[in-house]
């Protein structure tokens, strides 16, 4: 019983953190989600497979609803999407596999592409009110007619790359909201507080900065932000992951059309 409880806790931890990493924007192939009532393989339909997987996962992780199940390109291996998490299982639903699949023939990280597809689909459905953004936890730079908010972890390499690029870009007023992810970067909170108090590093300022950042982190969790950088446009559109400044400008100008 103790071993079973440990495994359940371990799986829950993996699912909780599976989506917490930065992604690079890339074009993924369009794919169709198969309904839970049926998993389709060319020439055959196996409605019991999805049900077995669904029941197995729900028993191990009762708070993890399954959104879709579909076959992969590997015989007998199925992809399971649960919220913003992705993992794999066999037809019996007995074993769960967490990790990445690489296609050596095409040199493609299939799992990373699917993660990006899922995040883009989620972003397209999501809106965050600009007026509600936790700007108390933001540093501001740049000027121009275009405005951009970025949820950023100061120790995230993609965030640093984006910040460096945006500081050299004209025409965008940026609000960079401190959003450390302690599970990935244990020192990020202290660094973020130091950035907010760059002009006043006194202890009182740092404590206030911690409070503001905690509010921003709670706000992000409520709005489904799990990775950095996450971009928000003034009209509420969201994009998860790094994007070159020229593409950001085009993305921001879409609201003006």
Image (spheres, rainbow, N blue to C red):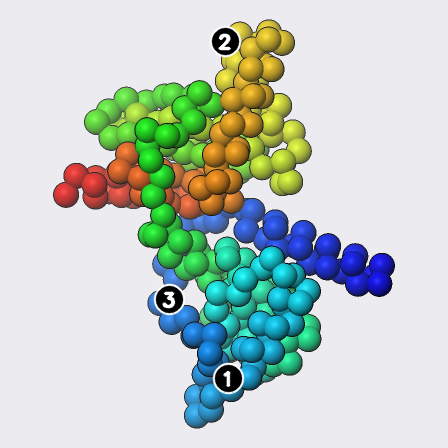
For the N terminus, the quadrant is bottom right
What is the C-alpha distance between the residues marked 3 and 2? Answer: 47 Å
Residue 157 placed where, x, y %? 53, 38
Is the residue 143 above or below the residue 55 in the image?
A: above
Number of other residues with Cα within 10 Å of mark 2, as a class: few under 14, some 14 to 19, many 20 or more: few
Question: First in sequence: mark 3 or mark 2?
Answer: 3
Q: Residue at x 46, y 81 (%)?
A: 38
For the C terminus, the quadrant is top left
Say if residue 84 shows up in the picture.
Answer: yes
Which residue is labeled 2 in the image? 199
Number of other residues with Cα within 10 Å of mark 3, as a class: few under 14, some 14 to 19, many 20 or more: few
In front: label 1 or label 2: 1
Q: Residue at x 21, y 43 (%)?
A: 254
Looking at the rendered structure, the secondary structure element under dot 3 is: loop
Q: Judge by depth and name the residue closer to the eye, 45 or 200.
A: 45
Q: Judge by depth and name the residue closer to the eye, 248 or 212.
A: 212
Say if residue 195 shows up in the picture.
Answer: no
**The furthest residue to the bottom:** 43
Q: Residue at x 52, y 13 (%)?
A: 198
Residue 134 placed where, x, y %? 43, 27
In the rendered structure, find residue 225 and report the number of the disc placed on it: none
What is the C-alpha distance between the residues marked 1 and 2? Answer: 62 Å
In the rendered structure, find residue 29 and report the number of the disc placed on it: 3
Residue 220 placed where, x, y %? 48, 37
Looking at the rendered structure, the secondary structure element under dot 2 is: loop
Which residue is labeled 1 in the image? 47
Question: First in sequence: mark 1 or mark 2?
Answer: 1
- The answer to whether residue 137 is left or right of residue 184 is left
């Amino acid at each position: 019983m103790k071993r079973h409880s440990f495994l359940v806790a371990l799986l829950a931890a993996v699912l909780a953190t599976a989506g917490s990493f930065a992604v690079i924007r890339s074009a993924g192939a369009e794919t169709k989600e198969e309904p839970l009532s049926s998993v389709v393989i060319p020439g055959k339909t196996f409605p019991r497979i999805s049900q077995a997987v669904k029941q197995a996962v729900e028993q191990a992780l009762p708070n993890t609803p399954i959104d879709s199940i579909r076959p992969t390109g590997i015989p007998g291996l199925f992809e399971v999407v649960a919220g913003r998490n992705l993992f794999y299982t066999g037809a019996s639903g007995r074993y769960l596999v967490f990790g990445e699949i690489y296609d050596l023939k095409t040199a493609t990280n299939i799992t990373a592409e699917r993660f990006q597809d899922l995040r883009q689909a989620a972003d397209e459905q999501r809106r965050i009110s600009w007026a509600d953004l936790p700007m108390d936890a933001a540093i501001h730079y740049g000027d121009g007619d275009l405005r951009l908010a970025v949820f950023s972890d100061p120790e995230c390499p993609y965030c640093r790359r984006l910040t460096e690029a945006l500081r050299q870009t004209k025409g965008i007023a940026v609000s960079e909201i401190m959003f450390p992810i302690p599970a990935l970067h244990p020192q990020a909170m202290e660094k973020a507080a130091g950035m907010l108090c760059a002009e006043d590093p006194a202890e009182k300022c740092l404590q206030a900065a911690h409070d503001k950042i905690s509010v921003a982190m709670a706000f992000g969790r409520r709005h489904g932000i799990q990775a950095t950088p996450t971009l928000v446009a003034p009209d509420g559109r969201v994009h998860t992951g790094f994007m070159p400044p020229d593409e950001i400008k085009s993305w921001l100008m879409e609201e003006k059309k």
